[in-house]
Image (cartoon, helix red, strand yellow):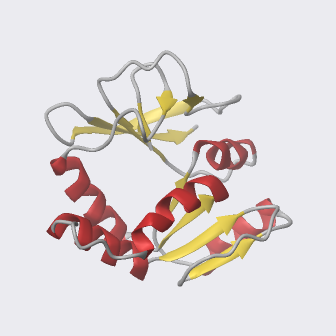
Amino acid sequence: MNQSLDGYVDHMAFGPSATLFRHFIEEAREQTGSLYGRHVYDLMRYWDADDPEWDADRRAFADAWRAQRKWVVSRLSPSVGPNTVLIGGDLERAVRHLKAAHEGEIEVAGPDLANSLTTLGLIDEYRIYLHPVVLGRGTPYFAGPRPPLRLVAHDRIDDDVIRLKYVPL
């Protein structure tokens, strides 16, 4: 998740540089799939339709995103696109089943969903892409209590963004 220095997530306030965007293309290609909250999934549906003005990187990300398995958590029954399954009901049981049934990394997209999964103890690793932006308000990355975390890795992705990897203790 992209985060401001003061702990907020806002895709409209700041976005990835070209270098970070290419990093996300590779991440999307390597992941087993992505687990979305409904609001973030609705934003990501942008990648379902081709745009003739996209450059090669945007086409590459769209291809990787479309090929990826996606699961959407929602109490409602929104329409979902290709390679996408709607998850309702018992979130804990559904996510435990996904983790048992699929090898590899399943990305969690959306701070509200991440908060719910944190409460359930179902996140194995947090990846925070820290941007040099101070927002002062918005949706916090960590909206509630979180477990004690241990830093296991950090690296510079581009000139301004650092990726921090934490695991729960």
Most distant residue in the front direction: 52
| Residue 100 visible somewhere in the drawing | yes
Give me the residue at 65% from left, 67% from top.
72
Give me the residue at 19% from left, 65% from top.
57
Residue 154 occupies quadrant: top left
Q: Is residue 86 left or right of residue 40?
A: right
Q: In this view, does 105 lie to the left or right of 64?
A: right
Q: Is residue 70 above or below residue 154?
A: below
Give me the residue at 57% from left, 61% from top.
42
Most distant residue in the right direction: 89
Q: In this view, does 112 lie above or below 13?
A: below
| Residue 106 visible somewhere in the drawing | no
Q: Is residue 76 above or below residue 122?
A: below
Q: Is residue 157 left or right of residue 118?
A: left
Q: Residue 14: x, y in percent?
A: 35, 35
Front one among 13 and 70: 13
Residue 139 occupies quadrant: top right
Q: Where the N terminus falls, by quadrant?
A: top left
Q: Residue 82: x, y in percent?
A: 53, 84
